[in-house]
Amino acid sequence: MAFTKLFSSARLLSLETYLQRTIRGCCHTAKETATNAKSEDVTSSGGQKKGLVLGVYEDNKRLTLTAAAEELNQKSGGKLDKHLNELSGELKLGKAFVVTDVPEYSAVALAGIGRCDAAYNKLEELDEAQENVRQGVGAAVLALRDRGSLDIAVDGGAHPRAAAEAAHLAAWNFQEFKSSENRKEDAKLSLHGTAGSEQWELGSILGRAQNWARYLSDMPANKMTPTDVAQAALDVLCPLGVRVSVRDRHWIEAQKMEAFLAVARGSCEAPVFIECQYNAGSSTAPVLLAAKGIAFDCGGLCLKAASEMSENRGSMAGAAAVLGAMYAVALAKAPLNVNAVIPVCENMVSGQCMKVGDVVTALNGLTIQIEDTDMEGRLILADALVYGQVMYKPSLVIDVATLTHGILLATGGGAFGCFSNSEALWRALQHAGSLTGDRGWRFPLWHYYRQHIHSDPAVDILNRGSGNSTPCIGAAFLQNFICGDWLHLDITGVGKLSHSPAPTYLHPHRMTGRPTRTLATFLMNSTTDEQQPPVNA
């Protein structure tokens, strides 16, 4: 049974509310510079305090203004130069200092955006020029929000896309359950000047897409059930021209998705299977996105410790990132075909939940013995991957999941894990990560790891297997359900709460929404020639 619209839910906010939410955070380092002249607050036509973000480069030991900042400096009679002299040695990369004596603005934040000659760093696999802009702009937007500025213009400089991403990410905050009198107003973000407006708009789309993924991941499990996830996809993606179909339990049973149903039957919340179709690439074969959508994961009978459950409302971070990428691609009107398949359910304990030792048959006929009920993500993905490939005949398959804790132990939250059977696809994804600052790291997809899940002659494969290399074993499990070019993204450690020092533009105590921008950028780049890093990098 397919639905084109679910019941309207009062618990979900409108499109404008959670896609254009831009509010304050507190993870920046900012300082207000004292001025001799007493300034009055300057407000916009809407009565909001006007703020401006200007970039400042480090040139050896000197601080230099961007072109837009220099122009304002001349208009103000050299006031910015005066402040730079006072800030010499203090305004470092990722810091922002607020001045209040510049005409036309209530406050101006000077953002440290690093060296003016920053470029692609091969060792870091990072476009440092763009990431430096994100760090500086993120700190500056937060500093202005703390001063009450709600109409903020941002100097895009040489990288308006990166500036827009950081501005929207930094200004977002999660306050869904605060009473209305305690809510803070949203800020209006805009580009200072007109140069780079197209890149600013693209960066704005990517930032808002990741913010939606953050919203979906951060909602409590009782407020973002599988049905609520489906409703959110319908409410947001359908108006953008994406066809969204939501399948119920009866349809899932009719398809004989036993692995998916084995996980879902432990919860009273009904499972759903979401299909999204975006077609703007003529008759070319689509890219298939598959995602783990576990709305809450307690581990099943292999129960997690309470401390490990605290962020497991975010076990559907893979689904959130895929939905966010679909939003970005559709809003940007990228000329390609993308389909998504997302099984969504909860992994809970009950008298009906799956048991250790159970054997289920996946959609492709392989039998799976369940050794660990806490390794449920690969079970629901197995059926989704087979279904998606049979239905859509994709040119490429990408799955995104918080699959294994081992990725967090390996990268410390600095990168998501990537497994691929294609060198070219990995290089393209690596390049996308270098542009967005949200990087992946490639792990081995060797036959050696497949042996770990084929050790029992009574069944085809095991859902845990032997050995401690859990990320590689998880990828080896999923490879049994792949029949073409494939990228597997294990986002544990980056997709939930930040487990590493958070950049200035991401709140350290909220869900990150990663790697939405990298996935969307990879998809958009696939329609252009921008697939590889510079030859001289």
Image (cartoon, rainbow, N blue to C red):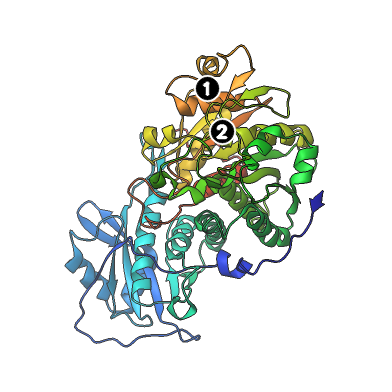
* Residue sitting at x 33%, y 48%: 117
- Work out how far the residue at label 1 is from the one at label 2, CA to CA, in angstroms: 10 Å
Residue found farthest to the top: 457
- At which x and y percent is residue 270? 68, 50
Q: Earlier in the sequence, mark 1 or mark 2?
A: 1
Structural crowding at the residue carrying mark 1, measured as other residues with C-alpha within 10 Å and reported as few (<14), some (14–19) or many (≥20): some
Residue highlighted by disc 2: 488
Say which residue label 1 marks. 445
- Decide if residue 26 is in sight here: yes
When the figure is inspected, residue 182 is found, relative to residue 287, above or below; the finding is: below
Instruction: Report x, y in % for residue 532.
Output: 52, 35
Disc 1 to disc 2: CB gap under 8 Å: yes
> 146 left or right of 367?
left
Q: Amino acid at mark 2?
A: His
Asked if residue 537 shows in the view, the reply is no
Above or below — where is 357 with respect to 329?
A: above
Quadrant of res 283: top right
> Which image quarter holds the C terminus?
top left
